[in-house]
Image (cartoon, helix red, strand yellow):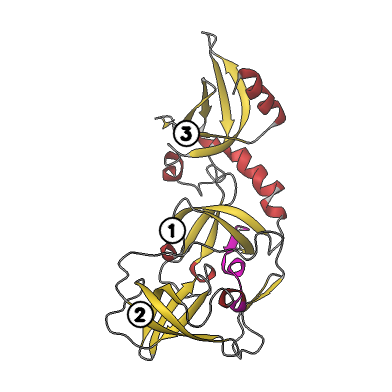
Amino acid sequence: MSEAALRRAMAGQEILQSTALAFDTQRRLHFRLGGYTALMEYEECAEGVVQGTVRDIAILTRVGRPTCFLIQSCEATEEGQLIFHLSRTEAQRRCRVEYLDELPLGSVIHCTVTHIEPFGAFCDVGCGISALLPIDCLSVSRISSPADRVSVGQQLLCAVKSRDPQGRLVLTLRELLGTWSENAACFSPGETVVGIVRSVEDYGVFIEIAPNLAGLAESTEGLRPGQAVSVYIKNILPDKMKIKLVVVNRNVGSSLRFEPRYFIRGGRLQHWVYSTPQSPKQIETSFV
């Protein structure tokens, strides 16, 4: 960006993004904007820094990563060089107040996975503000780790499920991945498809054939959760919400993770029902 463009962005308080290049001994982040030096003082590096709820590690790990900010001011050194002063804190405050706090429950939004924990995935929902995507909200199919479904850096569509006591968003993905009927309609008895073993029980093996759809095969020795197999679809029973499978090949040989297939891509959800009308087991979500 030219100097004029940067000054226009400063005057209009536009939210910009650039890669942080360094974190110095004065705890400032350094940037280069259109060939000009730009600095972000420590207290401007994130909401919560002043209150002590953000640690240094969360700031210094911004180095090498895209970072959102507003240009607060510009000054010239004695040598005539321009230095722009940036604020991520203010960009986050504006994103939260003008966007995130206004989102009704059930709103479908874009987000990016930033890191994964055993209990869920944390996602950037705007300007580096994090929201939790709990493991039980990643899909109807049972998974042992969020890494079975998503990866760091992956862009997702999610719905706003709730807000925690601090007002932070809690996200859900499974409602966007289709109902039992919508997923089952993509398959037919007699087909052979690739699946992922999700759990091994005494009475059989649950095998996922889509992120929101799993079937049951008879017990087979040597199968383990996460293993890719090929399965023959023996029968599809909507009234019982069951799919009967037969393991054809348990030595597929390559790891497998199904990418999300969205049946809902925007708007706002109010009530979602996964189950078929005939099924005695009802799985549903109300966004209230």
Return the disc, 2 or 3, that comes first in the chain's sequence: 3
Front residue of this view, candidates 91 and 283: 283
Query: Residues at badges 1 and 3 in contact (C-beta under 8 Å)?
Result: no
Q: Is residue 49 magenta?
A: no
Q: CA distance from mark 1 to mark 3?
A: 22 Å
Find residue 116 and name its label. Answer: 1
Is 172 drawn above or below residue 142 in the view shown?
above
Side of 79 relative to 178 (left or right): left
Return the disc, 1 or 2, that comes first in the chain's sequence: 1
Q: Residue at x 54, y 69 (%)?
A: 137
Is 225 drawn above or below residue 26 in the view shown?
below
Q: Residue at x 49, y 47 (%)?
A: 54
Kindly give the residue lying farthest to the top in the view shown.
79
Quadrant where the C terminus sits is bottom right
Q: What is the x, y in percent for residue 106?
A: 68, 64
Find residue 75 and name its label. Answer: none
In the structure shown, which secondary structural element does the residue marked by tag 1 occupy?
A: strand
Q: What is the x, y in percent for residue 28?
A: 47, 31
Is 89 drawn above or below residue 265 in the view shown?
above
Residue matched to label 2:
248
Among the 4 quarters of the image, the one containing residue 272: bottom right
Residue matched to label 3:
20
Is 153 drawn above or below residue 163 in the view shown?
above
Amino acid tagged 1: Ile
Amino acid tagged 2: Val
Q: Residue at x 50, y 57 (%)?
A: 122
Q: Give the residues in magenta.
A: 167-181
